[in-house]
Image (tube, grey):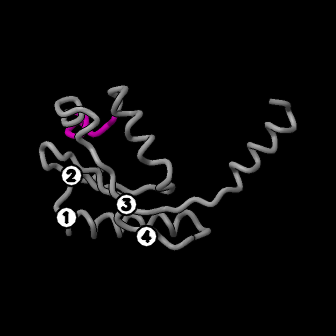
């Protein structure tokens, strides 16, 4: 890839629209579930699976379930998408509030 092509690809990546929201990670084998928030729902599953596969996830209960049941037992579900918000601190506050709502509603552990 030439330099100008690389610059164009980087610029396009930076300009892409991201969708923030709330997700649920469920272990179908054990019935356990975890709820989390993400500033970019499109990339959260890949990030979670990467950290779990490399045994570097910070939530010990989730990591233990992954180690016990394997990756094929886990499903990610998108629970809620947030409207686009240009101010990060407002988006983060809304994400935190909505995370609490879904955690209480589903009885899931937070990630």
Mark 3 or mark 4: which is in front?
3
Seen from the viewer's position, the closer of residues 81 and 86 is 81
Between marks 2 and 3, how big is the CA–CA gap?
A: 13 Å
Residue 1 position (above or below residue 42): above
Secondary structure type for disc 3: strand
Earlier in the chain: of badge 2 and badge 3, it is 2
Residue located at (71% from left, 56% from top)? 15
User: Based on the displayed image, in which of its 4 quarters is residue 47 positioned?
Assistant: top left
Between marks 4 and 2, how big is the CA–CA gap?
A: 22 Å
Residue 60 belongs to magenta span? yes
Residue located at (25% from left, 52% from top)? 34
Return the residue at label 3. 78
Return the residue at label 4. 94
Residue located at (49% from left, 57% from top)? 39
Earlier in the chain: of badge 4 and badge 1, it is 4
Between marks 4 and 1, how big is the CA–CA gap?
A: 18 Å
Tell me which segment is drawn in magenta: 57-63
Return the residue at label 2. 33
Q: Position of residue 41 (x, y in %)?
A: 47, 56
Earlier in the chain: of badge 1 and badge 3, it is 3
Return the residue at label 1. 106
Horizontal side of residue 22 vs 26, given as left or right: right
Between marks 1 and 2, how big is the CA–CA gap?
A: 8 Å
């Amino acid at each position: 890839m030439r330099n100008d092509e690389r610059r164009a690809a980087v610029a396009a990546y930076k300009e892409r629209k991201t969708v923030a929201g709330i997700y649920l990670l469920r272990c179908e084998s054990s019935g356990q579930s975890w709820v989390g928030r993400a500033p970019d729902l499109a990339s959260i599953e890949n990030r979670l699976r990467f950290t779990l596969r490399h045994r570097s996830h910070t939530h010990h209960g989730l990591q233990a379930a992954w180690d016990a049941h394997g990756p094929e037992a886990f499903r990610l579900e998108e629970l809620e998408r947030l409207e686009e918000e240009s101010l990060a601190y407002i988006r983060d506050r809304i994400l935190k509030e909505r995370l609490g709502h879904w955690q209480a509603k589903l009885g899931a552990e937070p990630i």
